Image (cartoon, rainbow, N blue to C red):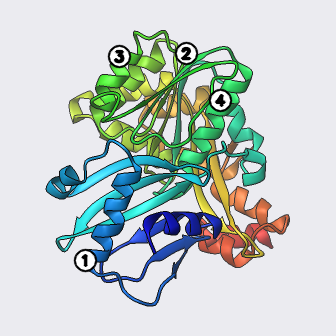
Amino acid sequence: MDIQTILTHATQQGASDIFIVTGLPLTYKINGKLIHVTKDRLMPKDTARLIQGIYTIADGRNYDAFSKNGDDDFSFALPGVSRYRASTYKQRGTASAVIRIIDFNLPDPKALGIPDSVIGLADIRKGMILITGPAGSGKSTTLACMIDHINQTRADHIITLEDPLEHLHPHKMSIVSQREIGTDTRDYVTALRASLRQSPDDILLGEMRDYETINVAMTAAETGHLIISTMHTISAADTIDRVIDAFPPNQQAQIAVQLSMCLSAVVSQQLVLAADGSRLLPVFEVLTVNAGIANMIRDNKTHQIGGLIYSSNQKDLFSMDTYLAGMVRRGEVTAQTALAHATNPSMLQKKLQ
């Protein structure tokens, strides 16, 4: 098969990712499971041919530069089919790629199972909202839904800084400026600093990777902008610790005070298999920062936050296990699946009884 046939077929099959790896049959990920599509294993010449085909579709990308550097990330579209995010890399000296499939249409939060309590956080006008979770947990989709909510309800200037661009946002009530790292600007820090001179109201920062990016983002949040970004952490308390620990020890007390004033909310998420096995559903933990939680962050008592979230069942403050328990009661997931993804399986078991 040529690359266009593979991309079209994978999209039609409802795959989330395509794996083109030497020594492995062509593989799709569907509902979280890896499925071999072909019997024959891909040889080095096969993967090179297919990945060169990706670069041909993605006008402006340089395959020779990838061959030299060994890594590349970019997005591209196949007209009439879908958009894609490719991560090409070398392994054992051969070309390989993982391709994420991105729908042309912006995601519908209700259809995907994203609750109003999460999307409604986008109504916050200033501060920092962090969407967290492991790779492939649906963070980019949640971000896209939140940005689209702002775009439909406010006359703002929204700036997105992404690596690479995923969902494309048309101008609705808001002006949306989408900038791709490496194509439209050099790096996150440069783009973030420049964005503060571009009359922004809301800034989507694809990922907070280092303390310099975090520092500029916190400053932007303090000065009256809404910053929405992601981190690869698994809980609200872990996220707060990760932000503070990114800074040198002699700055951490000051950063804790700064974070307590600018952090508005943390959403942690993962994907679990629906009870009928037909799709993956998102599961959430939500922490909305109030005065008490801000005091915990400032006073270095973040270890108490996890217990506070776990014991709460408020609309703006609930744990992953509380959300899972609700899904089990509604028949959306099985108890076995919920326990496998629980933060505290023994406590969830008691909740389910």
Earlier in the chain: of badge 2 and badge 3, it is 3
Q: Nearer the viewer, mark 4 or mark 3?
A: 3
Q: Distance between the residues labelled 1 and 2?
A: 48 Å
On screen, residue 313 versus residue 80, left or right, reads right
Q: How far apart are marks 3 and 1 (CA)?
A: 42 Å
Q: Mark 4 points at which residue?
A: 122
Q: Quick one: label 1, few (<14), some, or many (20+) residues within 10 Å? A: some
Q: Quick one: label 4, few (<14), some, or many (20+) residues within 10 Å? A: many
SS state under label 1: helix
Q: Answer above or below: position of 255 versus 225.
A: below
- Picture quadrant of residue 332: bottom right
- Disc number at residue 201? 2
Give residue 58's position: percent from left, percent from top. Answer: 39, 48
Earlier in the chain: of badge 2 and badge 4, it is 4
Q: Name the residue under label 1.
A: 44
On screen, residue 284 versus residue 79, left or right, reads right
Give residue 304's position: percent from left, percent from top. Answer: 52, 45
